[in-house]
Image: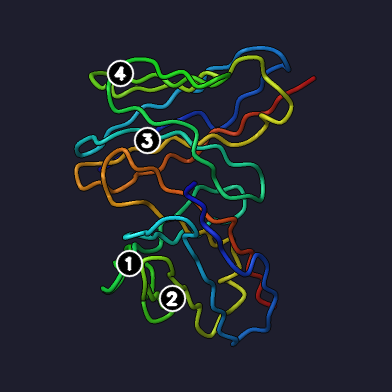
Amino acid sequence: GQNIDQPTEMTATEGAIVQINCTYQTSGFNGLFWYQQHAGEAPTFLSYNVLDGLEEKGRFSSFLSRSKGYSYLLLKELQMKDSASYLCAVKDSNYQLIWGAGTKLIIKP
Amino acid sequence: GAVVSQHPSWVICKSGTSVKIECRSLDFQATTMFWYRQFPKQSLMLMATSNEGSKATYEQGVEKDKFLINHASLTLSTLTVTSAHPEDSSFYICSASIGGGGNQPQHFGDGTRLSIL
């Protein structure tokens, strides 16, 4: 079966750095996406990785290792507005998007 | 760019009513649209994949006669919840992508919160 694992919940302090991990086992791989979802709202696209390495976008960076089936989302200089759920999703060999359950990130002052 | 509009954002209606939700891609043509359902504190659950001009592909366990999907144009897909009951109360979200290529993200509408009394 296809599976994506990410921690259920994480807590971090305002101004700090946090890393949210995602491991996946899918039938084929055509890219990995990270989305942010605030409570009661729809997800918004954050990043896309298809090759190994780090993609940086402002305060957010996403890393991929295809051989390890592993990705992480790194958030720097945390702000209170970063409190949200972060969803990891992988496109399989059929280009179907497989979703993780999401990691709820709580930012404390 | 890549804006998806979903309407209505909130619906409250009586049991037995049918409810139609619209999903529009405003600045791009969406060959594929997706319909999700999300219960409180749970993950997104894909209900169906909708391709313009063809029948939708429903996920296992989703009743196609209950959740009617129409994708008549490259910019509009509709989901009709027929004879809705309280257990259908949920957050329904549509998304659209420009083609099905690997690097194309899904862009989401703002969602529709459906409450059946």
> Chain letter of disc 4?
A
Q: Which mark is residue A4?
A: 3
For label 2, the residue is B67
Question: In the image, A87: left or right of A84?
Answer: left
Q: Amino acid at mark 1?
A: Tyr
Are tags 2 and 4 found on a single chain? no
For label 4, the residue is A65
Neighbour class for label 2 at 10 Å: few (<14), some, many (≥20)?
Answer: many
Q: Nearer the viewer, residue B25 or B27?
A: B27
| Residue at the image point whose x is 63% and y is 84% from the top | B15
Q: Amino acid at mark 3?
A: Ile
> Chain letter of disc 2?
B
Q: Position of residue A52 (x, y in %)?
A: 29, 18
Q: Position of residue B3 (x, y in %)?
A: 52, 52
Q: Is residue B114 above or below residue B27?
A: below
Q: Are marks 1 and 2 in contact (CB under 8 Å)?
A: yes
| Residue at the image point whose x is 59% and y is 87% from the top | B16
Q: Nearer the viewer, residue B31 or A25?
A: B31
| Residue at the image point whose x is 20% and y is 48% from the top | A94
Q: Position of residue A22 (x, y in %)?
A: 41, 27
Q: Amino acid at mark 2?
A: Phe
- Quadrant of the rendered image containing residue A68: top left
For label 1, the residue is B58
Question: In the image, A25: left or right of B62?
Answer: left
| Residue at the image point whose x is 68% and y is 80% from the top | B13
Kindly report the distance in space between the C-alpha atoms of the residues bearing marks 1 and 2: 9 Å
Q: Secondary structure at mark 1?
A: strand
